[in-house]
Image (spheres, rainbow, N blue to C red):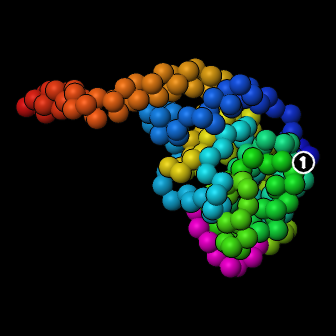
């Protein structure tokens, strides 16, 4: 499809698998710190899966009309194993864009996680899924299926721009998206920072954690 507002794009580069492996083992908060805190999603996104806590993978973007999930259904049909479905429904909470049946279908497609900028339903079913399902809220009200929508084109969620192929990482703190080309360098810094924080933990336990910077910061305000 090529008609704007009614189109599907499946041709894009994905973040490298080695980078995804590192991201899966790195706390989202640390990745956010070393990327200067500009790429984390805001609060309000909750993971409704009970046991699936962490993930990392390439974004597969979907934009739907608020209250309509026709193009999300299509995205599930064509998603690649390991994809993270990121669906922008404009944050609307009047209609659920995804429920248990779609979640179960996503699992059979090999989808790594689902992020809905909108609402979901069927919480008991979503809780049992082996993949994370993040959303802004819950409503029993179902969706329409008439379109329009777009798949594989850039979206913006919570002030964060996302293109298909970008790196999406999630854990119990929330979500972050890194541009595909920037992800390797950011993850390298994050890996180093994990080691720094491990040293700080040891210093806290030993009572030797340096605190002089606090007074220095206050003095600089004078």
Query: Crowding near pointer 1: few (<14 within 10 Å), some, many (20+)?
Result: few
**At x 60% / y 35%, what residue is drawn?**
25
Is residue 141 shown in magenta? yes
**At x 60% / y 58%, what residue is drawn?**
47
Residue beneath disc 1? 78
Q: Quadrant of residue 201?
A: top left
Regarding mark 1 in the picture, which secondary structure is present there? helix
Q: Is residue 6 above or below residue 82?
A: below
Q: Is residue 110 above or below residue 206?
A: below
Q: Nearer the viewer, residue 39 or 172?
A: 172
- Quarter that holds the C terminus: top left
- Position of residue 34 in the picture relative to residue 50 (left or right): left
Q: Quadrant of residue 66?
A: bottom right
Residue range of the region highlighted in magenta in the rendering: 136-143
Q: Main secondary structure of the magenta part?
A: loop
Q: Nearer the viewer, residue 53 or 10?
A: 53
Among all residues in the image, which is located at the extreme front?
A: 206
In percent of width and height, residue 48 lies at 63, 63
In percent of width and height, residue 174 lies at 53, 49
Q: Is residue 108 above or below residue 181?
A: below
Q: In this rendering, does residue 17 appear at all?
A: yes
**At x 71% / y 38%, what residue is drawn?**
57
Is residue 33 shown in magenta? no
Among all residues in the image, which is located at the extreme bottom?
A: 140
**At x 75% / y 28%, what residue is drawn?**
17
Q: Is residue 73 above or below residue 37?
A: below
- Position of residue 198 in the picture relative to residue 214 (left or right): right
Q: Nearer the viewer, residue 33 or 88?
A: 33
């Amino acid at each position: 499809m090529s008609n704007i507002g009614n189109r599907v794009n499946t041709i894009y580069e994905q973040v490298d698998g080695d980078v995804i492996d590192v991201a899966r083992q790195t706390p989202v908060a640390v990745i956010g710190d070393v990327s200067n805190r500009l790429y984390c999603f805001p609060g309000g996104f909750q993971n409704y899966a009970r046991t699936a806590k962490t993930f990392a993978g390439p974004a597969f973007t979907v934009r739907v009309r608020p209250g309509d999930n026709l193009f999300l259904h299509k995205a599930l049909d064509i998603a690649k194993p390991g994809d993270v479905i990121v669906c922008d429904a404009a944050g609307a909470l009047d209609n659920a864009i995804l429920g248990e049946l779609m979640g179960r279908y996503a699992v059979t497609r090999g989808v790594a996680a689902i992020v809905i900028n909108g609402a979901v339903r069927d919480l008991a079913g979503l809780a049992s899924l082996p993949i994370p399902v993040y959303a802004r809220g819950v409503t029993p009200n179902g969706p329409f299926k008439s379109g329009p929508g777009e798949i594989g084109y850039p979206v913006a969620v919570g002030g964060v721009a996302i293109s298909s192929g970008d790196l999406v990482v999630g854990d119990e703190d929330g979500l972050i998206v890194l541009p595909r080309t920037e992800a390797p360098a950011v993850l390298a810094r994050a890996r180093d920072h994990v080691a720094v924080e491990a040293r700080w933990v040891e210093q806290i336990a030993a009572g030797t954690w340096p605190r002089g910077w606090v007074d220095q910061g206050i003095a600089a305000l004078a």
